[in-house]
Image: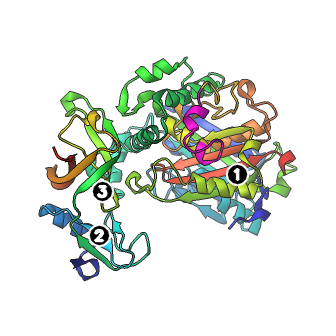
Amino acid sequence: MTQNKSLSVGAEKHYHDQLAQGNFLIQRCNDCSKSIFFPRMVCPHCGSDELEWYAPSGKGTVYSTTVVRRKPEAGGDYNVALIDLDEGPRMMGHVEGIEPDAVKIGQKVQAGIRQSADQNIVIFTPAGA
Amino acid sequence: MIDKKLRGAAAVVGVGQAGIGMATGYTEMEILIQAAKRAVDDAGLTMQDIDGIATASVASTMWVMPVIEHLGIRPTFIDSTMIGGSSFVAHLMPAIQALESGQCNAVLVCYGSTQRTSTLSRSAIGNMRKQMDPQPYENPYNPLSPLSSYALAAARHMHQYGTTRENLAEVAVAARKWAQLNPEATMRDPLSIEDVLSSKMVSDPLTVRDCCLVTDGAGAFVLVRADRAKNMKQKPVYVLGNSTACWNRQISSMHDLTVTAAQQSGKIAFEMAQVKPADIDVVEVYDAFTINTILFLEDLGFCKKGEGGAFVSNGNIAPGGILPVNTNGGGLSCVHPGMYGIFILIEAVRQLRGSCGERQVNGAQLAVVHGNGGTLSSQSTAILGTAETL
């Protein structure tokens, strides 16, 4: 496990560097054992700076969801959701692979990575699909 | 934590507005200065009497300095704290402390924006903000900022408590009915529940009529110590309580999308004021979106968590309802120039002065003002009262 303190870069750069290589990593606090997202330099639960990086299961549940309405010629509607990862933390993402308004709160989803503009982003698809 | 000595220690003695709606041909600084001049005149003071200032801007980080320059003042108290639209409610407590300590004698709180008519568009400012003030874990998903964050909160409230789009629409319709009684309000056409439900969806479940206006506008008020306020031009409106809370910036960092930091700011403000929600005559909350009014009425204790949808229904917060809420027409129908917080405070002062004409709440003595900033991020609650409430 990579320790955040042993890195020569900050948490934000490490997260994006790993994502660029196809790895979705989050942090866990060695002192209070809670998982953390977004990546940062001290644990927001206990204040410790003993944070380690690990790959979460990618499993999650839709906490809330919205459809951003956009004209078809501009690319059409898209989903923006908040996902509670099974490991605890919440993150924003797109739920894809189904119609944006078919995404339901409580739905089980699985994380994936795809390119968007000039970077990789974490996206979610319905679990078991 | 709560300094009860400060209850009623300062009073708002002057208010002013300018450029409400469209201020074509004026800069935001110019309408701010017009509003400031009106507030100082309203207080019966001169600009040279102002020795404290609080202001904030959406775009300019050092905004207080050019404001000082335009006003030609040399203040001994300066506050440029920027926590979004709640800033001008949050400016109260530091100003009261500065007045009480003798650091200054008259504080001007002021704001102006020409968001509607400015050549610098909202999307241009939004794109610049992504560079200056990045949110790298949300921006890649292109949520409409700030709209989609509030949409996510509304969707969660609907899921968790059975709140309906009709409940949300009730908030917009009530605001419009108040606006129809306010000659200064921007939107005064009739609006029905059906109109709200059938208007254009922007970010589900919020339609364009669930969203605040984009207008120009400036507002200002003057705060002095209570002993001085007694002998001034206007009937003083005392600050009985004020508290500010912030638990998160991003919607994705909010622990529970149905519970805002207004629970903290409201509790402390009410304790300081030594009153309870049932005592309140008029409520002015920052209704950037229809869900806000529901969340804040719950979090401030006007109804239980989850019951806000029913609470606002059947015209309960409209003129003639059980609780007058957002009596100027709110950000939804009156005015919303980027940050709305100063206008709720001005409306509460006008209600407590008894100067609201057709929309006056008879005998109003106690008001709650609640400001919101960011994406349900910063919350500031103030309790205002007439001399009878001291």
Q: Dot 3, how many residues are within 10 Å of its Cα: few (below 14), some (14-19), or many (20+)?
A: some
| Rendered view: B115 above or below B100 | above
Q: Nearer the viewer, mark 1 or mark 2?
A: 2
Task: Please name the residue shown 68% across and 25% down the image.
Answer: B319
Q: Residue under mark 2: which chain is it in? A: A
Residue name at image x 31 percent, y 45 percent: A81
Q: Quadrant of residue B354?
A: top right
Can residue B158 be seen at all in this image of the molecule? yes
Q: Work out whether B333 lies above or below A97.
A: above
Specify the principal SS of the magenta part. Answer: loop
Amino acid on which disc 3 is placed: Tyr
| Circles 1 and 3 on the same subunit | yes
Magenta segment range? B298-313
Q: Position of residue B107 (x, y in %)?
A: 69, 56
Residue marked by disc 3: B137
Task: Identify the chain of the residue marked 1, using the numbered disc in the image.
Answer: B
- Please give the label number shown on residue B254: none
Q: Which residue is mark 1?
A: B47
Q: Are marks 1 and 3 in contact (CB under 8 Å)?
A: no
Nearer to us: label 2 or label 3: 2
**Residue in front for this viewpoint, B349 or B67:** B349
x 84%, y 52%: residue:
B390
Which chain letter matches label 3? Answer: B
Identity, as a three-letter code, of the amino acid under mark 1: Met
Q: Quadrant of the N terminus of chain A?
A: bottom left
* Cα–Cα span, label 1 and label 2: 54 Å
Q: Which residue appears farthest toward the front when viewing the image?
A: A128
B219 on left or right of B211 = right
Give residue A27's mark: 2
- Whichever of labels 1 and 3 marks the residue nearer the N terminus, that label is 1
Measured as percent of width and height from the top left, residue A38 is found at: 32, 62
Q: Position of residue B69 (x, y in %)?
A: 57, 56
